[in-house]
Image: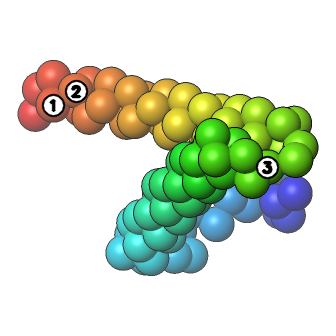
Amino acid sequence: MNPVSIGTKGVVPDLGLFNKSSTTDATDFMSVLADAINQTNEYQLISNQNVERLVTGEVENLHDVIIAGQKADISLRLLTGVRGKLLDAYQEIMRMQI
């Protein structure tokens, strides 16, 4: 929750927008996005390994294989949705007239 400061015109939320440099914000966003991509890749690799182990008969519990596959699927869908929103935002910015 963000702290609230009381100004002369009422209650104004302190969002911290003016205390940070834009480079830090961009770096934070880039690191969060990179971490999400790496995590999605890791889920995909784990799912593929579990499927290979299932085919060779090394897996005793089918539920673990299905859960790993669903984690990979959900993570990929989320990443694809974020990518779509980023592309929409980029296209909207490019349509703006200066």
Amino acid at the residue labelled 2 = Gln
* C-alpha span from label 3 to label 1: 51 Å
Residue carrying label 2: 91
- Report crowding for label 3: few under 14, some 14 to 19, many 20 or more residues within 10 A (C-alpha): some
Q: Would you say 96 lies left or right of 80 here?
A: left
**Quadrant including the C terminus:** top left
Among the 4 quarters of the image, the one containing residue 74: top right
Q: Can residue 66 be seen by looking at this rendering?
A: yes
Name the residue located 30 percent from the left edge and 31 percent from the top edge.
87
Q: Nearer the viewer, residue 67 or 23?
A: 67
* C-alpha span from label 2 to label 3: 46 Å
Residue carrying label 1: 94
Among the 4 quarters of the image, the one containing residue 88: top left
Name the residue located 79 percent from the left edge and 49 percent from the top edge.
59
On screen, residue 63 above or below 53:
above
**Quadrant including the N terminus:** bottom right
Among the 4 quarters of the image, the one containing residue 75: top right
Residue carrying label 3: 59
Name the residue located 87 percent from the left edge and 36 percent from the top edge.
63
On screen, residue 21 above or below 75:
below
Q: Nearer the viewer, mark 3 or mark 1?
A: 3
Q: Nearer the viewer, residue 21 or 29?
A: 29
Q: Can residue 12 be seen by looking at this rendering?
A: no
Amino acid at the residue labelled 1 = Met
